[in-house]
Image: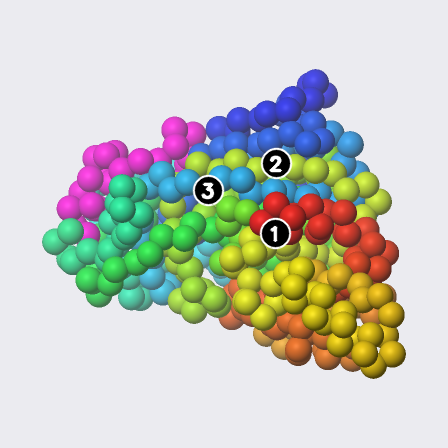
Amino acid sequence: MKKASDFIKVDQYVSVIGGSVDTDQVCCDGGRISAVTTPGCWGPMITPRIFGGHEVIRPVYIEGAQPGDSVAIFIEKVEVVSKFCSSGTGRPNEGRFDGDPSVKAICPHCGISHPETYLEGSGEDAIRCVKCGNPIMPQTYKNGYTVAYSKENDIAVAVNPQGAAQIAEMTGKGEVFLPENSKQHLATIIGRADFDGLPIRSRPMVGNIGCVPSVVIPSSKNTGDFSGSLSKTDLYPVPTASQITDAHMDINLVGEGCVVISPVLVDGAGVYFGDVHLTQGCGEIAGHTLDICADVTVKVKVLKGLKVEGPILLPAVNELDKRFRPFSDEEFANAEKLYQQYGGGKLLCSYPIQIVGTGDSMNTAFDNALERAAILTGLSIDELKNRTTVGGEIRIGRTSGCIYLTVMLDSNTLEKAGLLDLVIAHYSND
């Protein structure tokens, strides 16, 4: 194992993760990890040699992290690098995959799984098999759009067909940015503009961030609403809920200023991130959004002995609904005075945390989040339902079955859960 460093720069990318972590890059507890990410979804989804529809940074070994611990990942910077991006609702190209077009692409002419490809021109037929030269894109847009982004103004816009064709041509010529070691073809090569003229505010977020699962799977399947789809191919077994870390959340408040607490399932944790989005509304209604290259820096802290069932989020205060933000000194004093007026004593401070739940449906994900909250806090399901009705809420990461539960918890409960110091420090900084 290499000596631990307080700063790790990652420039390698993978699509399959889990089971173990290489020790050639070791980050010390309290150190930082930095990387320029590659686009997460559509580029890998149309590139046959990439497994699983995501390309993330190579996971980093965290010194001292062991199964049964957690790692707090402080997102310090998410800076947009891409000038162009593309997305849309999906349509599989029948005959070009076995079971799952994102996991097992096939050249129908050669019969080769995950063939090497090259670009010729632009559009739907641009991605071609190296061996036979035929178009083999395994999936494409049912309704797609192409976007140009201005870093100067931090504004983007969906371009018209002429603009999309121009950007596609630039992509084919290698004039659209992609990190050197990426293996994907950029989705802007498709050149679709089924609608245009939509102005877009940028609010970059990290769709896939956390520690690796305990079994080898594609990184995009590291979540309870997608892992079951691995049964469609013969390449990977379907993991149990206890074998994944639900790092692929697509929750739109996971950006700068957010803290992600992820369970550790293997020695060294294997912290990774990728699938950065230019912006996304709650729920990712189309199933995909604008994947970009981004300059990301995170700080990591090992939480020894803190065993969590899934991700816990401490969002930036401005991402919380105003109803559930930490109380001001004046608000708290008024609440304590009212509490004591009716027989209460000293009022405990309360703070919001968010607990992620996943499953094969929204209802299953909601139940999963409540169960995780009960295990973490020791509170009953019914009390948690009451607390999250008036002191919290449920919001959607993905409509396929990823949600997060906001709940206000008092300092005693947070201390018993092992989170109080981290929570106080986080909200004190905001």
Which residue is depicted at the point 63% across and 33% down? 60
Q: Are marks 1 and 2 in contact (CB under 8 Å)?
A: no
Quarter of the image where one finds residue 339: bottom right
Looking at the image, tell me whether mark 3 or mark 2 is earlier in sequence order.
3
Real-space CA distance between mark 1 and mark 3, rounded to the nearest whole angstrom: 17 Å
* Residues at marks 1 and 2, CA–CA distance in whole angstroms: 16 Å
How far from the left and from the top, in percent, is residue 38? 42, 40
Q: Give the range drawn in magenta.
A: 164-184
Give the labeled residue for mark 2.
Answer: 299
- SS for dot 2: strand
Position in image of residue 324 (x %, y %) = 61, 67
Q: Which amino acid does label 1 sit on?
A: Ala
CB atoms of marks 3 and 2 within 8 Å: no
Residues under numbered marks 1 and 3 in contact, where contact means CB atoms less than 8 Å apart: no
The front one of 255 and 185 is 255
Q: Mark 1 points at which residue?
A: 247
Q: What residue lies at 81% left-to-right and 79% top-to-bottom?
A: 341
Residue matched to label 3:
78
Closer to the camera: disc 1 or disc 2?
2
